[in-house]
Amino acid sequence: MSDNSETEDVHELFVQDGVLLFSAAASFISFVKSVGTLMITEYSDKSRNIEWKPIDDVTVDSDIQDQEWAVVNTVEKRIRTLSGSVPLEYKNRSKFLKVSFDEIKSFRVSDKNRRLTFNDGKSEQICTYLFQHGNCEHFVIFLKSLIQTIPSRRDKHVFVVLDKTNPEMEKMDKSFAELNVCTDGPRVWKLWDEFQERPMVATFEAFAKITDLVYRSPEHRELSEDVKEMLNKSITECGSNSTSHSQGDYEVVDVPYLPKRRDFPRGKPLTLDQWLGVQDHDGRIEDSECLKLMIYQGGITPSLRKEVWKYLLDYYPWNCTQAKRQRIIAQKNDEYFSMKLQWKTMSKTQEDNFTDYRERKSQIEKDVSRTDRTIEFYAGDNNPNLQILNDILMTYVMYNFDLGYVQGMSDLLSPILHLMQSEVDAFWCFVGFMNRLSSNFDADQNGMKEQLSNLFTLVAFIDPDLASYFTNHDSGNMFFCFRWLLVWFKRELSEEDCMSLWEVLWTGFPCENFHLLLCCAILTEEKQTLMENNYGFTDILKHINELCGRLNIDKILNDAQGIYYQIKESKQLNDIIRLLLGLPLTGSSLSDNHETSPFEENIGSSNGSTSMQPQSSQESIRISPDENSFEKCLSSNFL
């Protein structure tokens, strides 16, 4: 492990931001608990390393970043640490943590795939990282495409790196020797490289030798489990969706096949009898997952929303009794008014000396004055409900000053306050909502950029023609969906439809990122219009904005669930798509904790699917969307 490096050419193969150095050797102890950027690098001598650089040493031109990613009336300018989503040019590499691939003998993935620990094979940890934005799965998948690993037999979360001194490699060598495929170590791994770089050719060559051995040899020997696993893996890795693999004089083209889309008509809303039926005599919710499934399938009767939303938005724990709920209400009241008093009693001098606070207060006042004024609850001059809306947002600034206030938050609070008609209840439900969507409002917009990138990935899988059209018409950045994702379709739907949609999304069914599948459902529905009219970016943006008030929420939910099952049952489902939808990764212990949910038991199950690991690439990979500018969006009124 090194914290210094000579000046030399370095190529960043993979970059992930927002990674905390949790532990490291004594020589780097001063940076422990610091946030930085984790990279996989390759130097001019072809040596590969895992490097981490603290964020404080990263040089980012904030003016350039503001110009490149700013969206009019969307994100206020704040002085906050940027996670470095633009390519970073390091002026020097004098203070960074570097671990050579040769030093790594194993690594462990834990804490729901957020903690990654590297070991040196001597029962010593080299370093441990915590992934603060998302998890380490993309990083691990790419790392495993560069080094040869197998899961440890003692701990399914540990991956052992295969090298000449490793007993697992000796076992693999022995298995190859028994097959007579090759007789020395280098040739074993030459064949392994062939499997990775030319999977189809190498597989058929290996099968030819195995056929001679097994079926023409008098011994009729059985293949070892290691070899069976490797050969099976080589076949499953010979392609990935919508890609081509060169095989010398010919090309193998993988075209994703999706089964026919099924219909999933909406059910009836949760009724009072059903709501009471899931509670025991003390008022506990006995089966929260099945209750959420009912809500997902049909929504909630409007008269019950005020109570049920408090559970969906973490105001009440699902298993709390009626007595405990009364204690929670009293506690939440005290906390709220204590925070409200903090800004209410701030003096004029304090405000003058507190620029961030003053700017946020001004922005809230502007946004509140124009939020949902066509709804009777907020209509008219001197409406007291507008003052409550203002007070809740100001109190949230005191509750979460790192995030503060960003335009769009008033849109998320408005329906909640209208429903609750209680300042305290609305505040804590808004807190629960913001805990889910806070990354939408990051100062560097990384959360939004990642979602737009993920949306394009899903569109490319379910409809390659549409994705290709977007790319060829300067729209592959998906910026025209920005407003949909930022405030969860609040500006596109009536208040009733918005409430119906939000309560479905809060259930977490049927998968992670279901809101992205809603976008896919709308875009595929509009595909013919977009392509027949040959719309470019500006026209696409205009057309998308004109869908406001015309979307059928029941049809969109039906289509999105149909798309979910099309993807889930695809024979070519790869691990990138699995990650986006929260599905278990095939052939990987990263997802061994996956359990069948009530959704799978009651609605349906998928067919078996084949895993395809990402191919190794010399191109740099960063967990964020393509770094195109928002230039064309600057003249568009997203909000």
Image (cartoon, rainbow, N blue to C red):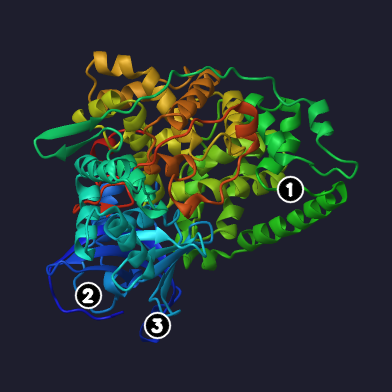
For image coordinates 59% across by 53% down, the residue present is: 396
For image coordinates 23% across by 45% down, the residue present is: 209
Spot occupied by residue 10 in the image (x, y as percentages of width and height): 16, 66
Amino acid type, callout 2 = Arg
Q: How many marks?
A: 3
Q: Considering the numbered disc 3 on the image, is that residue within a helix, a strand or a loop?
A: loop
**Label 3 – label 2 distance at C-alpha:** 18 Å
Mark closest to the chain's N terminus, 1 or 2: 2
**Label 3 – label 1 distance at C-alpha:** 43 Å
Residue identifier under label 3: 25
Near mark 2 (Cα within 10 A), the count class, few <14, some 14-19 or many ≥20, is some
Spot occupied by residue 328 in the image (x, y as percentages of width and height): 78, 53
Spot occupied by residue 175 in the image (x, y as percentages of width and height): 34, 58
- Is any part of residue 339 visible from this angle? yes
Front one among 534 and 29? 29
Front one among 634 and 479? 479
**Label 1 – label 2 distance at C-alpha:** 49 Å
Mark closest to the chain's N terminus, 3 or 2: 3
* Lateral position of residue 164 relative to residue 331, left or right: left
Mark closest to the chain's N terminus, 3 or 1: 3
Near mark 3 (Cα within 10 A), the count class, few <14, some 14-19 or many ≥20, is some
Quarter of the figure that contains the N terminus: bottom left
| Residue furthest to the left | 249
Q: Which mark is residue 541?
A: none
For image coordinates 22% across by 61% down, the residue present is: 183
Quarter of the figure that contains the C terminus: top left
Residue identifier under label 1: 316
Residue identifier under label 2: 93
Amino acid type, callout 1 = Tyr
* Lateral position of residue 599 relative to residue 104, left or right: right
Q: Considering the numbered disc 1 on the image, is that residue within a helix, a strand or a loop?
A: loop
Amino acid type, callout 3 = Ala
